[in-house]
Amino acid sequence: MTMMKFAWDNYKQYAWGKNELRPLTRNGHIGNMFGGLRGASIVDSLDSLFIMGLLEEYGDARDWVRSSLDLSSNGEASLFEVNIRYVGGLLSAYYLTGEEMFKQKVLELGEKLLPAFNTPTGIPRGVINLGSSGTSWSWGWASAGSSILAEFGTLHLEFLHLSQLSGNPVYTEKVMNIRKLLNRMEKPHGLYPNFLSPVTGSWVQHHVSVGGLGDSFYEYLIKSYLMSDKTDQEAKTMYYSALEAIEANLVQKSVGGLTYMAEWRGGILDHKMGHLACFSGGMVGLGADDADTPQKRQHYLDLAAEITHTCHESYARSATKLGPEAFRFDGGAEATATRLSDRYYILRPEVIESYMYMWRLTHDPKYREWGWEAVEALEKHCRVESGFSGIRDVYSSSASHDNMQQSFFLSETLKYLYLLFSDDDLLPLEDWVFNTEAHPLPVIRQACLQEAPAAA
């Protein structure tokens, strides 16, 4: 909580209303991910501040959203980032506090995302103009104008809640259409490649990753099932089929006995694991309980523990005790970054996220010990005079800071640490599902569905 207050106070002092704080130069950063939207750190922090009991700070954040969150922007925004940070943040603020203003804002924003789905297949494009034109297009770097699995596959939780709150089934229809298309498609070895054409509805290239480009698609399958109060059998079936294909094709054991998830390029394995893929320990653990047999349940819990252990090793093997952006298992490397370009750490949450889930699922004290190691490392290497900053090389004990306090540090990293050291009845996992930005959304019970207002 003191880390949160320190990060927040400095953001408020030096970058208020901007998207992120630059702590070394003590100014704000806007960036180009959110179109004309501002205040990403504010919207991302609403629930963290509220949950941690920082109510004065929460009040400042709420008042800014009420008076200054301008949704009439004309900028080019990432559909994915706006959905997970702004839609997710506003939804959870509404559900935690009951303040109607959050509901009005999120429904207004949700409507602006719908034109991204105006494609021949209904698979949304990655970039949308939030203004009245509603034009959308694919990222310039995305292979052959394709949409990205993690981006169009990470809308389900938020869109179901948009339908729930608005009484308008269109949001649910959009995401169910994506699922229907994916179910129909031929999948190489049962795997889901990262690039899909929104025009033809076919895979663009056979690159598969549980890290960047793929990650949260898998997370949202099991979480869709859990958020439906375990009634969404289709999501459950898709998740376990995908997990079996991942285990058969991507899960590897290193010479030193570490379990990791490699990437797959048209049948050839790339023996690296990204920091982003380290959420998967928590995901596999979270999904273990609903496997078909006791043996399978135990198997998945063991797999989750092994992956989380490997990710902890990527931290333990660095000078700073923080993990690199990507680490390898070839050429003699074991859970270490061999390329200079992979050595940075930008305050990412995924490893701590897995600690939090594994603590809740097993209560093995090592997960809290590992979490505390991360706290000490963050305090030692990432805390600067005016906030927290990422570092450029986790293997160098003299930190070179990147001058960026990411909004997800306040939303995810610090929230997962707080939950790791809290009682299990704070946001219990049977009642709440966390979106991929760690915004808690309530499980939709069947009674709630019946009470939801009918769409006009």
Image (cartoon, grey):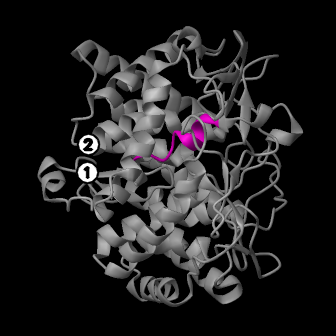
Q: Quadrant of residue 271?
A: top right
**Residue 403 left/right relative to 181:** right
Magenta span: 148-156
Question: Can you say whether 140 is above or below 234 in the image?
Answer: below
Mark 2 nearby-residue class (10 Å; few <14, some 14–19, many ≥20): many
Question: Can you say whether 34 is above or below 71 in the image?
Answer: above
Which x, y percent locates residue 315?
64, 41
Residue at the spot x=48%, y=35% of the render?
178
Q: Quadrant of residue 100?
A: bottom left
- Per the rendering, the mark at residue 443 is 1
**What amino acid is at disc 2?**
Ser
**Residue 197 left/right relative to 105:** right
Which x, y percent locates residue 22?
76, 74
Q: Are marks 1 and 2 in contact (CB under 8 Å)?
A: yes
Residue 346 visible in the shown view: yes
Question: Can you say whether 240 is above or below 23 in the image?
Answer: above
**81 falls in the magenta region:** no
**What amino acid is at disc 1?**
Val
> Which is nearer the eye, 209 or 328?
209
> Dividing the image into 4 quarters, which one contains the C terminus?
bottom left
Q: Quadrant of residue 82?
A: bottom right
Q: Which residue is mark 2?
A: 228
Q: Earlier in the sequence, mark 1 or mark 2?
A: 2
SS state under label 2: loop
